Amino acid sequence: MYRHLRNAWKKPGDSYIKDAMRNRVILWRKQPASVRIDKPTRLDRARSLGYKAKQGFVVVRTRVRRGGRHKLRPVLGRRQKRMGVTKFTPGKSKRLIAEERTARKYPNLEVLNSYWAWQDGRYKWFEIILVDPNNPSIKADKDVGWIAGKN
């Protein structure tokens, strides 16, 4: 099953994924920027990054706007080449920005990993896998117990 999901998500435009996501994104745009969801949209990707369907794991879908950064033009005079306004590349990826915003919203949880969920002309959505380090089932887990400080 996971193999078929992975192959469908490799080229979502050529598979059934595009039609399903077209309807979902209409709803996603109306939701807040960060939404806690019951289960991952891309189950194969979430499982490969460490997600397990048990207590202590939380999945949050976060929306980030697309496009480059907008930098204000300097007040004092310079020639255009030295203004540093155009072609300004930020040092952080959109995925990292989404992870940081989610971590600020859920301060008691730790970010385990994240993955791309979808994008349209205006936004990118990432799903962030969060772990509760104080949950007993996480402390006992051999794979993610290190987050709880287990040696």
Image (spheres, rainbow, N blue to C red):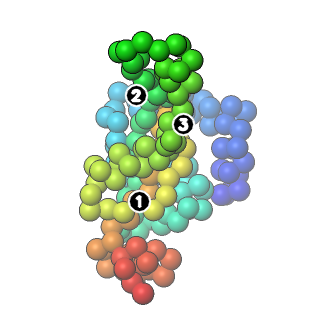
Q: Quadrant of residue 89?
A: top right
Question: Depth check: 103 or 16 in front?
Answer: 103
Q: Are marks 2 and 1 in contact (CB under 8 Å)?
A: no
* Residue 118 tag number: 3
Badge count: 3
Gap in Å between the C-alphas at discs 1 and 3? 20 Å
User: Which residue is tagged 1?
Assistant: 111
Q: Is residue 60 above or below residue 150?
A: above
Image coordinates for residue 23, horizontal then vertical, percent: 50, 28
Q: CA distance from mark 3 to mark 2?
A: 12 Å
Q: Mark 3, residues whose alpha carbon is within 10 Å: few (<14), some, or many (≥20)?
A: some
Q: Amino acid at mark 3?
A: Trp
Discs 2/1, front:
1
The residue that label 2 is drawn on is 29
The quarter in which the N terminus is drawn is: bottom right
Q: Residue at x 65, y 50 (%)?
A: 5
Picture residue at 49% right of the left edge, 63% below the top: 51
Indicate the amino acid at tag 1. Val
Q: Nearer the viewer, residue 30 or 100?
A: 100
Q: Kindly indicate whether the residue at mark 3 contacts the one at mark 1 (C-beta within 8 angstroms).
A: no
Q: Which tag, 3 or 2, sits closer to the chain's start?
A: 2
Q: Picture coordinates of residue 48 (x, y %)?
A: 59, 62
- Label 3 sits on a secondary structure element that is strand
Residue 26 seen in the current view: no
What residue type is disc 2 on?
A: Arg
Q: Secondary structure at mark 2?
A: helix
Reply above or below: 90 against 139.
above
One can see residue 4 in this view: yes
Residue 68: % across, % down = 51, 27
Q: Quadrant of residue 149?
A: bottom left
Sequence order check, earlier mark of 2 and 1: 2
Disc 2 to disc 1, C-alpha distance: 24 Å
